[in-house]
């Protein structure tokens, strides 16, 4: 059998703990046998991040900008107990945060739908992909308690000394106060990433804010989306037969609950935080959720939404059997390889990714799965496999589907 050739490398970011183990299984069993893999490898495992003073994370992000497509394994975000466990020099920032800041990207989270795991909202036939604007608003607020009566004002002093001053509240007694902001540059990047992503998956884009109440603040988000759509993306949307649709957040929530799914829903930071937890729990499992970072220029980084599955890793280290779900990590790989194939015009790579995704789904639908899925599955005759055997079962199904 001839391997599929690649022309441009993808950026490969290795990670930590159980997902690092899965990473190697996936490469050995599902990728290297079929693809002449070209990847530029960056080890984002915590040991190497510490050895390189986190430079490796920055280098990986810069390489992603250069090549346009990356796949990332889950990584540990250090906290106090990790400082001890790994004897770290510093409490490094979250790699995802570092990469997102360098790429100026937006994260799109989409559930992986499989028969036998119906979403709690039973009209959702297709996945709903959520895009959260992860910058500013209450996440970068300034807030404090107001001790007693007095006047609260909002003051902006321009570089030219010009002042804008407005009374927020004449307090008669104690209370609280909060100031927050966003920037046109960040909102524009967010909007561009959303338009690009919707075009790349050929799905409608919904956007919602509360601009009836917050006429200037939320109104600015709406205006920027509207302007960019009209001036830069409308023709491309129309030629692909998809649409951009703005509606109030309350109306959007009501419509989403009655929809069949199959669209991208863009949300402000707080709305996205809340709605993504709702979406993940309705679709069943964090282990069945992919996460794609898209930059405004159209650079793509694929990963699983879950973490490094620490508890399973400690079992694995003790030589115990683990049944860790590799589906989202496999689909991070196929997502990256499909995108590479599309960008470079390599049809065989796109077909490979499509067939591998089908193999994953059809393996599970045949009743063969990992323990986390068996626990929430409505199918009869379920077989639970360990981490590696599940990946091997996917490989067998792939070979049947692809006829290799
Ligand atoms: P987690 O790794 O997502 O795991 C939480 C629990 O969810 C697991 O203990 C397991 O439950 C279940 N689970 C998650 N993924 C699973 C899978 N693929 N297969 C089977 N079960 C799965 O979250 P965490 O334990 O809070 O975080 C562990 C480390 O991951 C932390 O150091 C954190 O910083 C990091 N993290 C990284 C990313 C990222 O890189 N994108 C995201 C989140 C967290 P049971 O134990 O009950 O089986
Ligand atoms: Mg949340």
Image (cartoon, grey):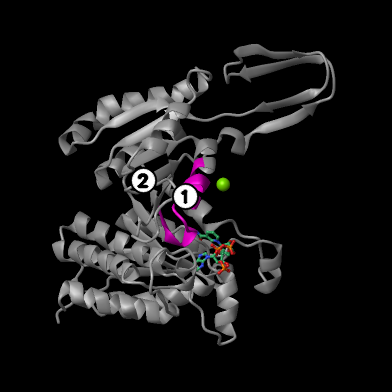
Disc with the residue nearer the chain's start (1 vs 2): 2
Relative to 159, say whether 400 is above or below: below
8 or 333, which is in the foreground?
333
236 with respect to 394 (left or right): left
Residue 292's tag is: none
Label 2 CB less than 8 angstroms from ligand 2? no
The residue to which callout 1 is attached is 282
Q: Report if residue 53 is visible in the image.
A: yes
Q: Is residue 280 magenta?
A: yes
Q: Position of residue 369 (x, y in %)?
A: 40, 72
Relative to 142, say whether 361 is above or below: below
Q: Are marks 1 and 2 in contact (CB under 8 Å)?
A: yes
Q: What secondary structure prevails in the magenta region?
A: helix
Q: Report if residue 193 is visible in the image.
A: no
Q: Position of residue 242 (x, y in %)?
A: 23, 36
The residue to which callout 2 is attached is 124
- The image quadrant where one finds the N terminus is bottom left
Q: Which residues are magenta?
A: 275-291
- Residue extending furthest toward the front: 380
Q: Is residue 103 magenta?
A: no
- Residue at 51%, 36% in the rendered image: 271
Relative to 394, say whether 169 is above or below: above
- Residue extending furthest toward the bottom: 319
168 with respect to 279 (left or right): right
- Residue at 20%, 65% in the rendered image: 349
């Amino acid at each position: 059998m001839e391997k599929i050739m690649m022309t441009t490398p993808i950026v490969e970011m290795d990670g930590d703990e159980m997902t690092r183990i899965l990473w190697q299984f996936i490469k050995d069993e599902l990728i290297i046998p079929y693809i002449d893999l070209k990847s530029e490898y960056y080890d984002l495992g915590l040991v190497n991040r510490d050895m390189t003073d986190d430079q490796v994370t920055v280098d990986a992000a810069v390489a992603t900008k250069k090549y346009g497509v990356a796949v990332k394994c889950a990584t540990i975000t250090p906290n106090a107990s990790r400082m001890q466990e790994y004897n770290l020099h510093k409490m490094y920032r979250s790699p995802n945060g570092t990469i997102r800041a360098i790429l100026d990207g937006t994260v799109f989270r989409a559930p992986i739908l499989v028969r036998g795991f119906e979403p709690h909202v039973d009209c959702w036939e297709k996945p709903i992909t959520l895009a959260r604007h992860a910058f500013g608003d209450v996440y970068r607020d300034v807030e404090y308690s107001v001790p007693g009566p007095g006047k609260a004002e909002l003051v902006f002093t321009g570089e030219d000394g010009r002042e804008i001053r407005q009374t927020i509240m004449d307090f008669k007694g104690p209370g609280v106060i909060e100031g927050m902001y966003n920037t046109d540059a960040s909102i524009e990047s967010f909007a561009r990433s959303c338009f690009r992503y919707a075009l790349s998956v050929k799905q409608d884009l919904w956007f919602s804010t509360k601009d009836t109440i917050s006429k200037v603040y939320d109104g600015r988000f709406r205006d920027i989306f509207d302007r960019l759509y009209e001036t830069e993306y409308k023709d491309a949307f129309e030629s692909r037969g998809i649409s951009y649709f703005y509606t109030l957040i309350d109306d959007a929530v009501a419509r989403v609950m009655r929809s069949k799914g199959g669209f991208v829903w863009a949300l402000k930071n707080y709305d996205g935080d809340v709605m993504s937890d709702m979406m993940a729990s309705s679709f069943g499992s964090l282990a069945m959720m992919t996460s794609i970072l898209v930059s405004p220029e159209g650079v793509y980084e694929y990963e699983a939404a879950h973490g490094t599955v620490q508890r399973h890793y400690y079992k694995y280290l003790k030589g115990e059997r683990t049944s860790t779900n590799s589906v989202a990590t496999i689909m991070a790989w196929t997502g990256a390889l499909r995108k590479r194939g599309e960008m470079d015009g390599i049809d065989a790579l796109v077909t490979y990714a499509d067939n591998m995704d089908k193999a994953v789904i059809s393996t599970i639908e045949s009743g063969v799965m990992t323990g986390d899925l068996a626990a929430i599955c409505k199918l009869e005759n379920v077989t639970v496999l360990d981490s590696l055997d599940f990946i091997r079962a996917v490989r067998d199904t792939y070979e049947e589907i692809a006829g290799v």
